[in-house]
Image (cartoon, rainbow, N blue to C red):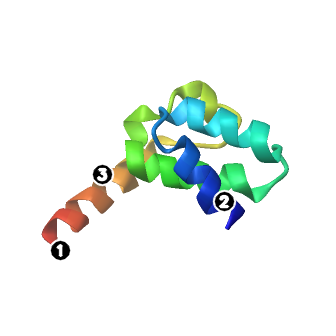
Amino acid sequence: MVFSSHFDRVSHLDFTSALHESIEFAGSANYCPVLLGAMAGILYGVQAIPPEEYKHAAVTEGAFVLYEECLMIAEML
């Protein structure tokens, strides 16, 4: 319930602003920023995620290839 009300509040923002507000709201050790980041990624698309937001993670080119493949599959449904 808390997550959904927070997502409604930040869903009009860009990816970075939504993520940072979520971290400010719940703290970086909470699952709220993780869930909001996933939902915002779906809402805004992978292109909207600036590299500085995932430079700490082991994101590879394969992740973007997988994203493109998922888009192609979704279009076939």
Task: Identify the amino acid type marked 2.
Answer: Phe
Residues at circles 2 and 3 in contact by the CB criterion of under 8 Å? no
Q: Which residue is mark 3?
A: 68
Residue 27 has which mark? none
Question: Who comes first in sequence, dot 2 or dot 3?
Answer: 2
Q: Residue at x 62, y 36 (%)?
A: 54
Give the percent coordinates (x, y) of residue 52. 61, 25
Kindly report the distance in space between the C-alpha atoms of the residues bearing marks 3 and 1: 15 Å
Q: CA distance from mark 1 to mark 2?
A: 29 Å
User: Which-is-in-front pick, marks 3 and 1?
Assistant: 1
In this picture, residue 29 sits left or right of residue 57: right
The residue identified by callout 1 is 77
CA–CA distance in space, label 2 to label 3: 28 Å
In the drawing, does residue 67 fall left or right of residue 33? left
Residue at 49% across, 45% down: 11
| 8 vs 52: above or below | below
Q: Local crowd at mark 2 within 10 Å, few (<14), some, or many (≥20)?
A: some
Q: Is residue 45 visible?
A: no
Res 73 → quadrant: bottom left
Query: Which residue is located at x 67 percent, y 33 percent?
Result: 20
Give the x, y percent position of residue 28: 81, 44
Q: Amino acid at mark 3?
A: Glu
Residue at 37 percent of width and 53 percent of height? 67
- Comparing 60 with 74, the one in front is 74
Look at mark 2 in the image and give the residue it sits on.
3
Q: Could you tell me the amino acid type at mark 1? A: Leu
